[in-house]
Amino acid sequence: MTSPSSIQQAALSERAMALAGKRAFIFDYDGTLVRGDVLIPGTVEALEWLRLKGHDLAVVSNNSFLDTSELHQRLVRHGFPVVMANVHTAVSVAADEAVRRAPRRRVVCAGSAGLAAALERRGLTLVTSDADVVVTGMDRDLTYDKLTLAVEAVLAGAVFVAVNMDRLLVDADRIGPGGGVVAAAVQYATGRAPDVVAGKPSTHLLVEALAGLGRPVAEACIVGDNPASDVAAGRNLSMTTVLVTTGVTPSGTTADDGPRADIELASAADLPAVLSFQRSPKRGASDE
């Protein structure tokens, strides 16, 4: 019978082989590095270890509240060694997309105050009618009236941009509805799917991250907690995927959760142990 230690070593070996040659690690934020604004234990130390070993680091987030600079400030406050050039958020992608698609700069925002601020910082005007673009995202202050404005604008022909299509949002001590719930409500009411989905599983954030790091897909992997967004985005780019069980996926995956990851870990904090693993030399009969 195989001993527990042998089983553990075999698992480590398999995971280490899957990550062989990876020079860039792209991390999701919510549920992977933090829950709410609470650090997941060991994640800062893990990213610092990776940095010291010469790996490139980036963070890509579907967060519906934070622009790139705001997320970077949080990362710095927590101690994560990631420079702002390598931080990418769905809010920023959605806001930039709205700028490109709003010739009159008129936008309806069915999302958070943070999303609204990101749109206004780019010179867009938030309106209640006659909009070029509708942008949806997670909104803890969502009202029926706000949802109605978004539906009316999409029915009138406005471009429909969703920050993300996440079903769930991980907070410090609970899991609730994500930004995709707002987009899905508008889609159901209008019969129109979003014209653009800024966040994962769309590949915008990963493409931005790879370009910033100067690495090809083959040298990178994405580490995240959500099979339907993080793993799916990686699959869409043929990127190696690592699923952690600190967020919306407390254990394992099922066919309904999204595609299976190449590797599953309890936490991103386990990466140094996996990457440090070296297969022990086989012992001969005389050593037994």
Image: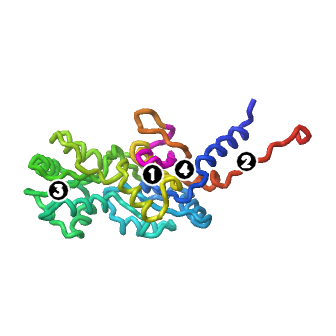
Kindly identify which residue carries mark 2.
Answer: 279
Per the rendering, the mark at residue 31 is 1
Mark toward the start of the polypeptide (4 vs 2): 4
Kindly identify which residue carries mark 4.
Answer: 267
Image position of 4 with respect to 210: above or below: above
Type of the residue with mark 3: Val
Rounded to the nearest angstrom, the CA distance separating label 1 from label 4 is 10 Å
Q: Nearer the viewer, mark 4 or mark 2?
A: 2
Disc 1 is placed on an element classified as loop
Mark toward the start of the polypeptide (1 vs 2): 1
Rounded to the nearest angstrom, the CA distance separating label 3 from label 4 is 38 Å
| Secondary structure character of the magenta stretch overall | loop
Mark toward the start of the polypeptide (1 vs 4): 1
Counting from the top left corner in percent of width and height, residue 93 is at 31, 60
Q: Which residues are magenta?
A: 235-252
Kindly identify which residue carries mark 3.
Answer: 133
